[in-house]
Image: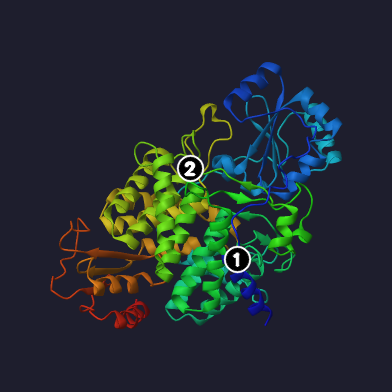
């Protein structure tokens, strides 16, 4: 009954009015602070000239402990005095700089990094540092500005020899995936609780092939995650601490919203559980009401604190009216390509699950805004309005474009996905994997490959190659996967390895290939396409061949044309007879998927 009551409350989020209350920090109090400057090579030129060290404060606008550090540590008079005299202080919002965020993701947020004048790392600290600790750290660095024990040489990474797992490493990954699962509380890991989207997606894939344990793991996790749904506004809190689901951190970050929405939509497509659809709708309503810009793009996040630095449990216990009387936590209204790509992909999967045209229209609206406002020559995308873009931006948009092609059968989206993949290959390839950004001038804090991005890129480029027959895309997938399969890269992930296992499996097996043959104006053909979209998997090559339009593939299998629309389902070994009845399509897919 408690779960049903919570879902009933969440469903009300669809009727929340758009933002109207003033932000609580509209007139924030002015705190003393050191002089902050932006991150750039000029910082280190100045540091050498002035014989100073460099402090990088890498935080997030939504982060409670970042606010506490601003209120306590960086407002402390003694700390300010030492920093002003001996350091150049750089503050960076990690959402604005994916290259720095990826490099130091194990240290935050906040992450505190000290550099020598020439850019050499001296100290890396994770989390909140109180004034007493900061003073001791500053004095120690002033006395001895040499690298400390937190700075270790970068390990040399050699790519995997093959884009396939040897049996012993596969067994190790499979064991980590299974043994890391928390059978008592659900999800993976015993400290922080959140929906590990790659692991749950892998469970969906395994369950579709009859793995009962995988089904139980996925459904237990999806049910437990509902505890992190905001009952007043919808959306999901970032995670819960203490090893259970009862101690949430209240920030709402786009990646969490988008991935939760996407996975709940996939789960609903597969099992038709109303609770999964209710969860997806609650997240979508939050995105629509709180993280949508007037232009049709998506914002970045909403703060964990109503008043920066003060815990907000009592605030988030209120209903909508009670919260609005007190004000609204700050929303980061930056418009980044990466976050928009994540949201577009989630909306696309929700449309695939429901067939609701306004959901698809919202995804297309955001995609067109990004194309108009963030596109770079050659198929890439800027992060914000003026930068040169990061891997994550073009990758997220490429994934969204390929999914939009499956949904709309409009070839322009396939061409945009192909251009995005080519841009990534031209700009972010390194000898081992693909880096988060182009190399920075001076080589200070150089961008590194990041595991999740290379896993996603391997999956995107491999499926793109299946659609197009493009060997260049296949080589991108292989190069990214050979980085992701290096044990030194994935072992620190412990049990969060579902994405690696999916990427490796997909690269070495053909996707389920579904082709609709018939005019797009034909109602039966449209119903067959809708039935195909409900397949709960992103590793499906779905196309629509309308004889009045250009062929969808350069390497197309010749399907017979007839007066009756039909669907064909192919594996790497065989194709089905023509399926002309949409009502029988699902059962046929189930049989083929189970065999595959």
- Considering only vertical position in the picture, is 588 above or below 349? below
Label 2: few (<14), some (14–19) or many (≥20) C-alpha neighbours in 10 Å? many
Q: 531 left or right of 563? A: right
Give SS at disc 1. helix
Q: 496 left or right of 367? A: right
Q: Residue 584: tell me if it is visible.
A: yes
How far across and down, in percent of the image, does residue 364 sit?
39, 54
Give SS at disc 2. loop
Q: 520 left or right of 10? A: left
Q: Are marks 2 and 1 in contact (CB under 8 Å)?
A: no
Residue pictured at 46% horizontal, 69% vertical: 266
State the mark number for residue 435. Answer: 2
- Considering only vertical position in the picture, is 463 above or below 86? below
Q: Nearer the viewer, residue 241 or 174?
A: 241
Which image quarter holds the C terminus? bottom left
Q: Residue 491: tell me if it is visible.
A: no
Front of the two marks 2 and 1? 1
Q: Quadrant of residue 115?
A: top right
How far across and down, in percent of the image, does residue 465 sit?
30, 55
Q: Earlier in the sequence, mark 2 or mark 1?
A: 1
How far across and down, in percent of the image, does residue 91 sit?
67, 35
- Considering only vertical position in the picture, is 596 above or below 428? below
Residue under label 1:
13
Label 1: few (<14), some (14–19) or many (≥20) C-alpha neighbours in 10 Å? many
Q: Nearer the viewer, residue 316 or 405?
A: 316
How far across and down, in percent of the image, does residue 398 sit?
39, 50
Residue pictured at 55% horizontal, 72% vertical: 278
């Amino acid at each position: 009954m408690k779960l049903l009551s919570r879902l009933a409350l969440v469903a009300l989020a669809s009727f929340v009015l758009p933002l109207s209350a003033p932000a609580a920090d509209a007139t924030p109090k002015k705190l003393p602070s050191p002089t902050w400057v932006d991150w750039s090579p000029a910082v280190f030129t100045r540091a050498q000239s002035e014989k100073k060290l460099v402090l990088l404060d890498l935080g997030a606008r939504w982060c409670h402990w970042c606010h506490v550090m601003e209120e306590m540590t960086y407002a402390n008079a003694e700390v300010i005095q030492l920093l002003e005299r001996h350091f150049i202080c750089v503050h960076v919002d990690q959402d604005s700089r994916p290259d720095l965020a990826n490099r130091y993701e194990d240290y935050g947020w906040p992450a505190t990094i000290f550099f020598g004048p020439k850019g050499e790392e001296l100290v890396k600290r994770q989390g909140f540092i109180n004034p007493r600790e900061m003073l001791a750290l500053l004095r120690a660095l002033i006395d001895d500005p040499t690298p400390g024990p937190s700075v270790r040489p970068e390990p040399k990474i050699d790519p995997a020899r093959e884009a396939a797992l040897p049996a012993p490493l596969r067994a190790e990954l499979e064991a980590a995936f299974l043994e890391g699962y928390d059978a008592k509380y659900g999800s993976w890991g015993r400290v922080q609780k959140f929906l590990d989207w790659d692991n749950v997606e892998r469970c969906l894939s395994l369950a579709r092939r009859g793995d009962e344990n995988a089904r139980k793991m996925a459904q237990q996790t999806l049910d437990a995650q509902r505890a992190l749904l905001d009952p007043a506004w919808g959306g999901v809190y970032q995670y819960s601490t203490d090893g259970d689901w009862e101690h949430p951190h209240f920030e709402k970050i786009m990646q969490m919203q988008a991935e939760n929405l996407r996975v709940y939509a996939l789960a609903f497509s597969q099992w038709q559980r109303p609770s999964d659809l209710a969860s997806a709708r609650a997240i979508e309503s939050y995105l629509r009401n709180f993280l949508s810009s007037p232009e049709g793009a998506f914002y970045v996040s909403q703060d964990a604190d109503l008043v920066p630095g003060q815990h907000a449990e009592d605030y988030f216990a209120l209903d909508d009216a009670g919260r609005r009387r007190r004000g609204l936590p700050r929303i980061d209204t930056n418009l980044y390509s990466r976050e928009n790509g994540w949201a577009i992909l989630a909306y696309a999967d929700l449309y695939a699950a429901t067939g609701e045209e306004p959901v698809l229209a919202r995804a297309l609206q955001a995609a067109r805004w990004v194309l108009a406002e963030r596109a770079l020559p050659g198929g890439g995308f800027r992060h914000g309005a003026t930068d040169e873009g990061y891997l994550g931006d073009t990758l997220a948009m490429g994934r969204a474009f390929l999914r939009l092609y499956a949904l709309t059968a409009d070839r322009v989206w396939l061409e945009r996905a192909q251009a995005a993949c080519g841009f990534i290959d031209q700009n972010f390839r390194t000898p081992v994997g693909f880096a988060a950004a182009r190399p920075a001038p001076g080589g200070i804090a150089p961008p590194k490959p990041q595991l999740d991005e290379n896993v996603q890129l391997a999956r995107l480029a491999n499926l793109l190659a299946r659609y197009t027959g493009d060997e260049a895309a296949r080589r991108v997938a292989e190069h990214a996967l050979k980085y992701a399969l290096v044990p030194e890269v994935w072992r620190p992930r412990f049990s969060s390895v579902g994405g690696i296992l999916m990427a490796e499996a997909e690269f070495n097996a053909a996707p389920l290939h579904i082709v609709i043959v018939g005019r797009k104006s034909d109602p039966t053909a449209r119903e067959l396409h809708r039935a195909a979209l409900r397949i709960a998997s992103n590793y499906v090559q779905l196309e629509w061949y309308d004889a009045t339009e250009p062929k969808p593939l350069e390497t197309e299998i010749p399907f017979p044309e007839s007066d009756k629309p039909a669907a064909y389902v192919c594996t790497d070994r065989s194709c089905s007879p023509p399926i002309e009845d949409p009502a029988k399509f699902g059962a046929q897919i189930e049989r083929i998927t189970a065999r595959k």
